[in-house]
Image (spheres, helix red, strand yellow):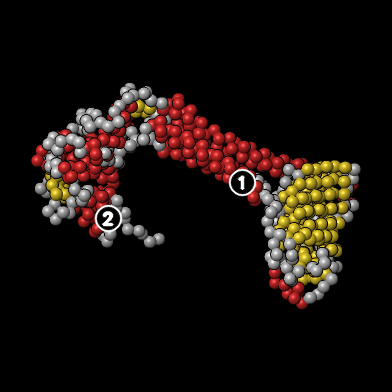
Amino acid sequence: MEEKRQVALLIGAAILIGLSALLFLAVIPSEEHGFSGDLFVESYEVTWKEDGELTERYVYSVQSPDEYRMLFRIWKAPLLYGDTAFGDPHIRLISATAPAGSTTYLKTESGAVHLIDDDSGRVRTLVSDLAYPNEVGIINPGYFSPGEYIVEYTYQMVSPVEYDSDAVHINLLLADEHIPYRHVSITLISDRITDVFTYPPSYEVKKQEGVVVITGSSPSNERIGVEFLMTPDALDSVAGVKRQVEGVREKTESANNSYLLGFLIADLLLIIGKILVVITPFLLLLLYYLYGREKEFTVPEYLSTVPDETMPPWQVNLVFNKDAFTADENGFYATLLDLHRKKKIEIRENQNKKGVTIRLVEVEGDDQYEQRVINFIHLNSDESGVLDTGYFEDVAKRAKSSSADEQIAIRLKENLNDLMSRSDDTVSGRYAVNGRDKPAIILAGAVGYILIGVLAFLLTTDTEGTLVWAIFLGAVVAVQAGIAVALPSTVFGHWKEDYYKRKLEWNSFRRFLSDMSMIKKYSPDDMNMWGIWLIYGTALGVGENVQKAMKELKVDISQSGYYVPTYFWFAGFYSISTFSPPSQGGGGGGFGAGGGFGGGGAGGR
């Protein structure tokens, strides 16, 4: 695949991934925040008065028949009924209004069940079995039909009250685990309220004379609450369990500033994530334009001659096969064939067709890599100077039950894999510049962005939904950049001098050897040509295709000093290079959105 085509596919894939992520982001949250499920609250109205009276009005919207027989709200605070004495903060149900055909029930923290206006044994059993502690609701044993159901509750709320000489503080958490609320209206009746903080902060606050009205909507399980400060003279009139705390105003403002900062950070991260997803493909294109563009060269589509026979096969494999800075096992195999051609080693097939034998003829190679291959053969040869690759298979088999052979197999694997996957930046650097560090900067930035998102997720309150999507977008950017990093190192780097032309020539040569119809056009009599094709074709990963053509044309190059490998000649090397050792055994109140007295929310079952 030519470089420009690789870049075009990269940019196209990055754009497609980015647009898909943004579309997913647009569709999924709208579904999560929608109000089209089987059950939601069409309207939630709550009124608070200084004397502790709290009135809730729910309009439940049931969409499916035979699905719900209990419409309820749960409190995360002690819920009482009647004249039971209780000294700690609590909520006491005073009265309830239920639609016709339903019964109001209440289950206290201790598990006591109270039925209002009805005492059916079946209803009591259902409530006792199904309701949670601190739950109030309506029940219809025959299930609610689709439609709207209006329920009103009046409570005496005895909440925690903090105060000092400067302010009185109350924090009400009205819901945090609930079905969606389409319309929310919170009314605070008092002329002593000085400051109001809402959860979530997106709610609209309108202050009128003696009244504060808060409106908004809430998807499922979003925190709904209000925290407010009052003048010091409100202490005598407000109901609650009162506690003197120094610095009430400062603590309230500090907690809410931190809360708002969390939302600001989350929103900012989400915006940055959307921008990064969009611009990353173009940043990659810019990096290619600045660092990766190559000179234009014209080379034949097919090339039958070896572009440079002076270049050792292992270097061809390293520089011109796949990535200019990474070799593979084909360089090792091609070097063995070349050493046989140069009569430095002699390769013969075992009579039992179990691998091959390699006899050292000379102990000095023409370059450092050849010398390392020769040293490996010498180190693993028997007393007669012959390496039998069947030995590798035997060691790999014995290593499964012998710890001594396991250590030998591990050493052999390390040495062989070093030869098969060896990279030499000194050699590669003569031909090309590695450009992977360019997109790696974007990848590192994406990882840093994700870590910031995770940290914000852990440290902030009520921003989880936004931050999850921000982290998701960071992962998308990481994928976009990761694909770029995975491309050949010269895509964002470049070939030195005119070596890009040489790269194209080697590509044309590989293309020629990969095309059986092209190879068959050449005479089977030129043994040297076929032998060179086999060696360099092996280095380029297409040696098997050359062997196939030689077999069909009955070309025998063995008499000309070349070795023609068979399908099992590498079996011993493969068995040891892929060896794996056997597995071894072995309360409420407080300041800020994190507090708040009440909690829970509406639901159905």
CA separation, marks 2 and 1? 55 Å
Q: Is residue 84 left or right of residue 575?
A: right
| Total numbered circles | 2
Residue located 26% across and 45% down the image: 416
Residue 89 seen in render: no
**Residue type of the residue flagged with mark 2:** Glu
Name the spot of residue 545 as percent of width and height, x first.
24, 42
Question: Disc 2 marks which residue?
Answer: 406
For the residue labelled by badge 1, is the local secondary structure a helix, a strand or a loop?
helix
**Percent of width and height locating residue 605:** 69, 65
Which labelled disc corresponds to residue 27?
A: 1
Q: Is residue 40 left or right of residue 194?
A: left
Quadrant for residue 301, please give it: top left
Q: Nearer the viewer, residue 533 or 450?
A: 533
Foreground tag (2 vs 1): 1
Please tell me which residue is depicted at 45% across the width and 31% down the height of the picture.
438
Residue at 30 percent across and 38 percent down: it is 327
Residue 27 point in image, percent of width and height: 61, 46
What amino acid does circle 1 point to? Answer: Val
